[in-house]
Amino acid sequence: MTDDLTRSTVTTQEQLAQDEGQKMRERAFRAAPKLNRSPLHGLWALTNRDLVKWYKNPIQLVISLVQPVVWLGLFGKAINLSLDVPGGYFSYLSAGMLAFIILFTAAFAGMSVVWDRRFGFMNKALSTPVGRGAIVVSKVLQSVVRSLIQAAVVLGIAVAFGMDTANFGIMTVAGSFAILFFMSFGLSSLFVMLALRSADWQTQMAIINLLNLPLLFASNALLPVESMPGWLQTVVRLNPVSYAVDGVRQMLLGATSAPGYSVLAPLWADFGVLVGFAALLSLLGIVLSWRLLSK
Amino acid sequence: MTAAIRTSGLTKRYGDVRAVDALDLTVERGELYGFLGPNGAGKTTTISVLTTLLTASGGKAVVDGLDIHKHPNEVRRRVGVVPQEYTADEDLTGLQNILLCADLYGIPRSDSKPHAMELLRLVELEDAADRKVSTYSGGMRRRLELASGLINYPKLLFLDEPTLGLDVQTRTAVWNYIRMLKEEYRMTLFLTTHYLEEADSLCDRIAIIDHGHIVRIGTPTELKASIGGDVIVVGVAESDPDISDDIRKLSLVKDVKKSDHEYRIKSEVGEESSIQIIDLLRSKGLQVTKISLTKPTLDEAYLEFTGHGIREEEASKMDAFKHRVTLMRARR
Ligand SMILES: Nc1ncnc2c1ncn2[C@@H]1O[C@H](COP(=O)(O)OP(=O)(O)OP(=O)(O)O)[C@@H](O)[C@H]1O
Ligand SMILES: [Mg+2]
């Protein structure tokens, strides 16, 4: 009798466990749901992945801020060149530092492509139907978001240390970030494109070093164009970074004219150059991604 | 109904190296098909081409009724891949990794959330679902890869060396999942391996591949039988008369050799022959001092067809690195 009872409980439990298992399996392999087939599906998921990795690791953010802050302290405060620039040299340099942090963050956008290739994640993504273009654009977008947030922090620090805020307003700040957005979009596309085929971080590092410092020094980010030799002035005028810095200074510092200082281009032209730059490079990146991401 | 995979003349060249060389194969639906070959034989390359990760240099392939050149995206939607190396993002949790995969397939979150948990339960990872993958052991990572490969409800699953670097228990567990996928879900599985006992115990059919060619296709039993058959060793007293000729007359026996105190007999079906031989000896009033039966292993078949054992092949720098990373993670 007792035996029978135990046996029947055992059977019920086993039965339950089996039913549970069966249900689970049926569900695990029932008909597939309707898929999102838009060419941009997965774009946000990929972008968000990189952003989550970034904000979960605040050390990265802190490290990336060290350089511009040291520059501001060293050249803006300690040495404080007595150049005749609008708002004083510290404010002038602060605008340059916004471009600096955008440039350096964008340069490392390619690095995350290299790591994804190395650790196999890229292959995983490529084996799914996610758009090849979405993979590239996600790398650009995550870099843009990061660089703009970092630029905002740098701006906050600069203001705290005495940047001239007389011309700050919703329009000028928003406009500045708009121009930084285009700069970041173009530069990130450039560096992602250069990394698409590479699984080798040394080469990528070399590319970053090769491009970063010339893009920074051959621009008006640190010093006024007027203080440079003629040939360098030509290079500065070819460098998209210069137009971003020029635009930011016109908006944030009201630097339209001052004795011994002239703008690089009218504000609308600054915007034009950067929008064109961003559009050209991101299109190129998407086109190349079709060719380069499959072999 | 069309075959799950059908290729003709499929070729992938790297410069002068033909990693996959004019491959013709057919995998039927519901089959567990093994691709067995030494390092550098072209197993991974074949999977990469069939899953559209690489573009073939020549030939044709139809996967799940779809031409891989004409409809690569549809092929990607339909098949599942469990790659040779670990591809999960170490900084994310197991669950986040699977959900990310689901997003890349365009599966709505309302479906992928419960499905991901079910798959994690299936591979017994539900307790580790919210832990970062960097804290997973090699076996857990492998099981996570398996779960990710199933997120898009594939009917056809590619598994590239699914038990590489795993201990015996985890390997057995993975084998059980694989059997379950075939038997309960009627999935077609295409599995590569260079573990012979894995191919032997799992696969319905095996293709032995070397230098990008298929050198032999057959069921494990056929492959083993083509080597020769079972070997029976029967011990007798040295003074007994030689009855080799009588044994040779038994129907399944193929060959008999007599040494001083034992017979070495090759038979097509060892179990049946041994009983007949014992009966024969007894009927002649002779004593059997010992008897042993050896089944041929796939090892012998493999060595015969590839002409060499597991061989180290110079891999590209990248592959070597990935392999090292895979092993490194597997050991943790
Ligand atoms: N990107 C590449 N460039 C040049 N050669 C390659 C490349 N990838 C693979 N090969 C070569 O193609 C051949 C087949 O490689 P594959 O990775 O398919 O072998 P495998 O059978 O998967 O080996 P393993 O068992 O070691 O994984 C090898 O000779 C390899 O060196
Ligand atoms: Mg391989």
Image (cartoon, grey):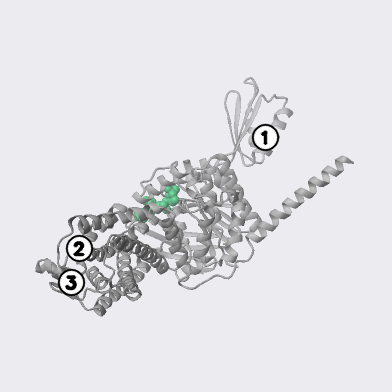
Q: Which mark is residue B274?
A: 1
* Residue type indicated by callout 2: Leu
Q: Is residue B22 visible?
A: no
Coordinates of residue B181 in the picture (x, y in percent)? 61, 55
Q: Secondary structure at mark 1?
A: helix
Which residue lies most toward the top here? B239
**Numbered disc in front, either 3 or 2:** 2
The CA span between labels 3 and 2 is 14 Å
Query: Looking at the image, is mark 3 or mark 2 earlier in the sequence?
Result: 2
Q: Which residue is label 2 attached to?
A: A222
Coordinates of residue B90 in the picture (x, y in percent)? 46, 51
**Numbered disc in front, either 3 or 1:** 3
Left or right relative to B40: residue B4: right
| Tag 2 subunit | A
Asked whether A101 or A6 is in front, the reply is A101
Q: Is residue A96 visible?
A: yes
| Tag 1 subunit | B
Q: Residue at x 34, y 49 (%)?
A: B317
For the residue carrying disc 1, how many other residues have a C-alpha within 10 Å: few (<14), some (14-19), or many (20+)?
Answer: many
Q: Which residue is label 3 attached to?
A: A237
On-image quarter of the C terminus of chain A? bottom left
